Image (cartoon, rainbow, N blue to C red):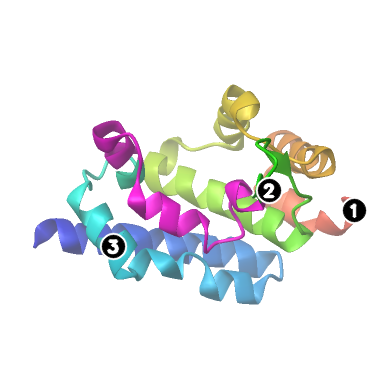
Amino acid sequence: MTKIIKHFILITRHRLKVMKYCFKMKLYWQGIVHDLSKYSLTEFISSVKYYNGKRSPIDNEKDDKGYSLAWQHHKGRNPHHWEYWIDNLGTYENKPCRIPRKYVLEMICDWIAAGQTYEKRDWTPEKMLNYFEKYRKERIFHPETLDFIDDILYDMFEYGVDFTIKHLECFEY
């Protein structure tokens, strides 16, 4: 029972942080509906089973089984994940679609909130940027989407999250 409560608190805390940043970006609907699928039976049961409070249960499930049913469910229902925008049907090639601006911004809110949720006071925009750079080659982005993400992450590193959010209208996409 404790894992159920702890996982529920963790995903709710994360959602509230995403909501806070989405609202700052005037993405009210994205903030309200962000990650609601995590409360579905498919995702919640699997995530409780693999919950340890230190890292994503999805990563723990992948380590155990080689895949995550929760992740397959989640990424297919949440357009703020870059994997949602990969088109490979009938092509045997992963072609990235240009992600709409509102979902790129929600994705960045998600990254900020995830870092703050798991790293707490140790989180910084620099850590987020370094993490993104470390896994850049494993992620498949449309070139325009990647340029937009780079602009925002580097500005957050240089000027801070709040300043960058206040000046989002300056970023072309």
Instruction: Tally the numbered discs.
Output: 3
Could you tell me the amino acid type at mark 3?
A: Phe
Q: Which mark is residue 44?
A: 3
Q: Quadrant of the N terminus?
A: bottom left
Could you tell me the amino acid type at mark 1?
A: Cys
* Secondary structure character of the magenta stretch overall: helix
At 26% from the left and 37% from the top, the residue drawn is 65
| Residue sitting nearer the eye, 161 or 106 | 106
Q: Which mark is residue 87?
A: 2
Query: What secondary structure is marked by label 2?
Result: strand
Q: Distance between the Cα atoms at labels 2 and 1?
A: 30 Å
Query: What secondary structure is marked by label 3?
Result: helix
Q: Which residue is mark 1?
A: 170
Front: mark 3 or 1: 3
Say whether marks 3 and 2 touch (CB < 8 Å). Answer: no
Mark 3 surroundings within 10 Å by alpha-carbon count, few (fewer than 14), some (14 through 19), many (20 or more): many
Could you tell me the amino acid type at mark 2?
A: Asp
Location of residue 151 by image quarter: top right
Front: mark 2 or 1: 2
Rendered location of residue 117, percent (x, y): 40, 49
Vertical arrangement, residue 7 with respect to residue 135, above or below: below
In the image, farthest residue toward the left: 1
In magenta segment, residue 67: yes
In the image, which residues are magenta?
Answer: 59-85
7 left or right of 30?
A: left
Rendered location of residue 146, percent (x, y): 77, 38
Say whether marks 2 and 1 touch (CB < 8 Å). Answer: no
